[in-house]
Image (tube, coloured by chain):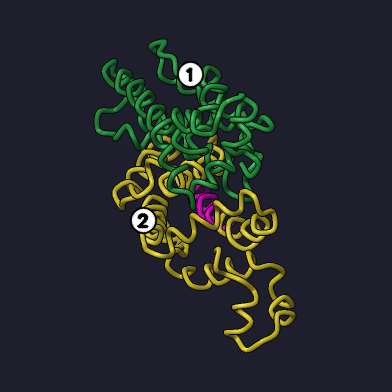
Chain colours: A green, B yellow
């Protein structure tokens, strides 16, 4: 992110800074939008009717994306920068975490309707156990680099053994 | 962290910079050591023989600490800074996450010996589901500020419903 500026983007696009700012309110919002545009299809949610398979599939895809360079480290640095950059934090919330969270909650809600999730478990708890376990292995020094496919699978297996009805 | 320098610490301690560096290799290591010294007893692990109660107790204490100002936001900013500061990341790993992780794994291992944890579940998966779910609510824009006591309790309940033997 250190080298990412609205000026450079405007220059490469052959546009003025004000034109870029007309569409994106901040460099953070622009960086996020680029990121989401680039990786969105790789980590799209699908509802096949089998919540265990669908969560495993998307979490393994997320783990693979996070292991890639430069996308994984770039994403970790963006989250790091958001701790002291309220504009970037807002962009993250509005353009990435907010929409993604609504999608996975809809997926879990449909699974609960089908009787695959215990009615007494908060759906946000399941989301944060699963994605939190992965973000931990992306962001926390000492465990970064250990976000394997198997870890993502195990996380879903344990969380759904606890929150599921089977 | 922006205002925290070895120079200022040395000045307040009435010591030279080189004396401070003799005991702490970097400002990150010094900041972490101060943090751990200040909060260590509040989030100490205890083994009472009941893994559900012990994990709930320590995770709720961690959630309370993270909700406090300035300790919570300061900790989030330290983790954020570690994304682009390898020295700080190493200090985190060596002086905080490494030792804490060994302690909670020992706690879980003892619980497994007592038959409270399923033998087929990786203990690190349980750790990362639990702490990851909390770090998610500390670090990820849009869900920060929602790390309640009840959330910590629910996280333990779901994870142990999945990984425990009861």
Tell me the subunit letter for badge 2: B
For marks 1 and 2, give the one nearer the viewer: 1
Image position of B28 (left or right of A40)? right
A159 or B28: which is nearer to us?
B28
Residue furthest bottom in the image: B14
The residue indicated by pointer 1 is A44
What range is drawn magenta here?
A: B102-114
Q: Could you tell me residue A61's position as x and y percent?
A: 56, 23
The residue indicated by pointer 2 is B60
Q: Secondary structure at mark 1?
A: loop
Q: Could you tell me residue B160's position as x and y percent?
A: 40, 41
Q: Could you tell me residue B33's position as x and y percent?
A: 59, 70
B103 drawn magenta? yes
Tell me the subunit letter for badge 1: A
Which residue is at a point 69% across and 79% down the rendered structure image?
Answer: B20
Q: CA distance from mark 1 to mark 2?
A: 33 Å
Residue A70 in which image quadrant: top right
Which residue is at a point 69% across and 67% down the rendered structure image?
Answer: B26
B21 or A56: which is nearer to us?
B21
Which residue is at a point 50% across and 22% down the rendered structure image?
Answer: A58
Q: Residues within 10 Å of mark 1 (few under 14, many from 20)?
A: some
Residue A39, compared with residue A26, is above or below; it is above
Q: Is residue B55 visible?
A: yes
Residue B88, compared with residue A73, is above or below; it is below
């Amino acid at each position: 992110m250190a080298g990412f500026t609205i000026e450079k983007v405007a220059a490469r696009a052959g546009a003025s800074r004000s034109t870029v700012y007309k569409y994106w309110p901040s460099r953070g919002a622009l960086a996020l939008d680029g990121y989401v545009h680039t990786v969105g299809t790789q980590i799209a949610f699908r509802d096949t009717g089998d919540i265990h398979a669908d969560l495993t599939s998307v979490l393994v895809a997320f783990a693979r994306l996070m292991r890639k360079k430069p996308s994984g480290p770039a994403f970790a640095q963006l989250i790091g920068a958001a701790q002291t950059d309220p504009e970037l934090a807002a962009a993250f919330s509005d353009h990435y975490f907010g929409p993604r969270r609504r999608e996975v909650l809809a997926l879990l809600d449909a699974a609960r309707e089908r009787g695959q999730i215990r009615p007494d478990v908060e759906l946000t708890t399941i989301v944060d156990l699963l994605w939190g376990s992965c973000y931990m292995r992306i962001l926390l020094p000492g465990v970064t680099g250990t976000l394997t496919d198997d870890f993502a699978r195990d996380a879903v297996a344990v969380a759904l053994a606890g929150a599921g009805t089977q």
